[in-house]
Amino acid sequence: MSNYLEILMIMVALVLVIVIWSLSSVLAMIAKKVVEFSKTNKKVMMIIVVAFGTMFANQAMAQTDAAISDSTAAKVPTFYGGLSGTTFWTLSSVIALELLIVLLLVIFIRNLWNVLNPVQVIDKKMSKSWIIKTWDTLDKKFFTKAAPIEQEADILLDHDYDGIKELDNALPPWWKYGFYITILVAVFYLLKFEVWHTGQNPTEEYSTEMVEAKIQTDAYLASAKENVDEKSVTMTDGAGIATGKLLFAKTCVACHLSNGEGSVGPNLTDDYWIHGGTINDVFKTLKYGYPDKGMQSWQTTYSPVQLQQLASYVKSLKGTNPPNAKAPQGDLFQDSVATN
Ligand code: HEC
């Protein structure tokens, strides 16, 4: 057992034994199935005979192949790869025989498999599964109610237009139901848009969407220049302050009164500030608020630019001295550039 070729050949022979063993079990399994079917179906016996026939035809060919390879192998020198002629030829014969058996098994399995498969198809058709039965019912109910071609003569009407006759066949049910649904939708549509006027017609929808788009565009354009925060904020221009005044009148007067003189919220016109009097401080107060003190955060209500306008307006109120102003709160704040 010192020769590698010998070891290799023995290994191959052993592997082939395993292959033969597995193929035989497969064959046995398939054969058993075929026998079972042949009990119920007489035709199968015929097919098996045919299968055997092909097998022998194949075997004849395989033998010829083996014979050819044998004659070529005979020309190989007596000592081959360091093995004695006897050992080499014995092992070669074993491997060749095993290969032949494998070949035969494969052919046989293939033939029987071919026998078995059509049988399985026939068998399935004979005893319909519940899936097929359900499908048949559904099919009749929803998909094809039409008479089969063989029965078309029965439903052909007498009408004859120059040889063209009318076939009174049933429409596909799903299609008909679809048509009924469109009728219902049409009635509903008519009522909703023409009688009750609860929906928008396309023209109205269009103008609504245009308005919405305008709002969105404005918001986008506004946000494009909105990089103002409490650090970078500066006093805005006169137009900005005017806008701030409008926003203030809308939202802030409830607590700070119309002139900023203060009621619930502090007086915004004096030199005293609780949270600082620079434009940055005021902006910060508006942005984040002091919710626990009654002044909410406005950053979700107003954009940074609007906060800037509000803060600028608040700053512009300084020294306006409105009547009935609330008493100063907070610290005195001297802002030399308050009105820049
Ligand atoms: C619900 C009432 C209320 C509304 C509305 C309100 N505020 Fe105030 N505001 C307050 C109160 C209360 C304070 C004092 C907070 C504190 O004591 O810390 C305050 C404080 C302020 C301050 C800081 C004053 C300081 O002395 O530091 C500013 C500035 C201000 N508000 C501006 C506004 C602006 C601008 C609006 C509108 C966007 C507004 N507030 C809306 C109640 C309100």
Image: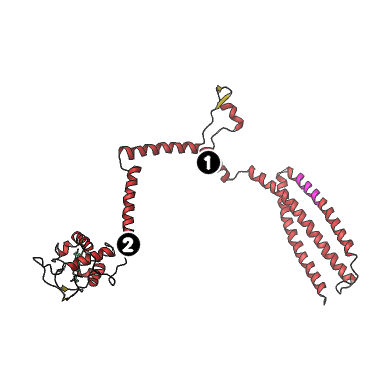
Percent position of residue 115, x then y: 73, 48
Quadrant showing the C terminus: bottom left
Percent position of residue 19, x then y: 75, 63
Q: Is residue 243 left or right of residue 43?
A: left
Residue that label 2 marks? 223
Taking depth in this image into account, of 282 and 57 the one nearest to the observer is 282
Specify the segment rendered in magenta: 45-55
Tell me the amino acid under the disc marked 1: Leu
Label 1 residue near ligand 1, CB within 8 Å: no
For label 1, the SS is: helix
Tell me the amino acid under the disc marked 2: Ser
Q: Is residue 15 left or right of residue 162?
A: right
Name the residue at 71% across, 44% down: 41
Percent position of residue 278, x then y: 21, 73
Point out which mark residue 116 bears: none
Taking depth in this image into account, of 333 and 81 the one nearest to the observer is 333
For label 2, the SS is: helix
Name the residue at 43% across, 36% down: 180
How is the protein colored in the picture? secondary structure
Q: Is residue 11 magenta?
A: no
Residue 200 visible in the picture:
no
Q: Is residue 4 above or below residue 205?
A: below
Label 2 residue near ligand 1, CB within 8 Å: no
Ligand 1, what quadrant?
Answer: bottom left
Residue that label 1 marks? 138
- Crowd tier of the residue under label 2, counting other residues whose Cα lies within 10 Å: few below 14, some 14–19, many 20 or above: some
Q: Is residue 312 left or right of residue 136?
A: left
Residue 215 visible in the picture:
yes
Q: Nearer the viewer, mark 2 or mark 1?
A: 2
Give the quadrant of residue 187: top left
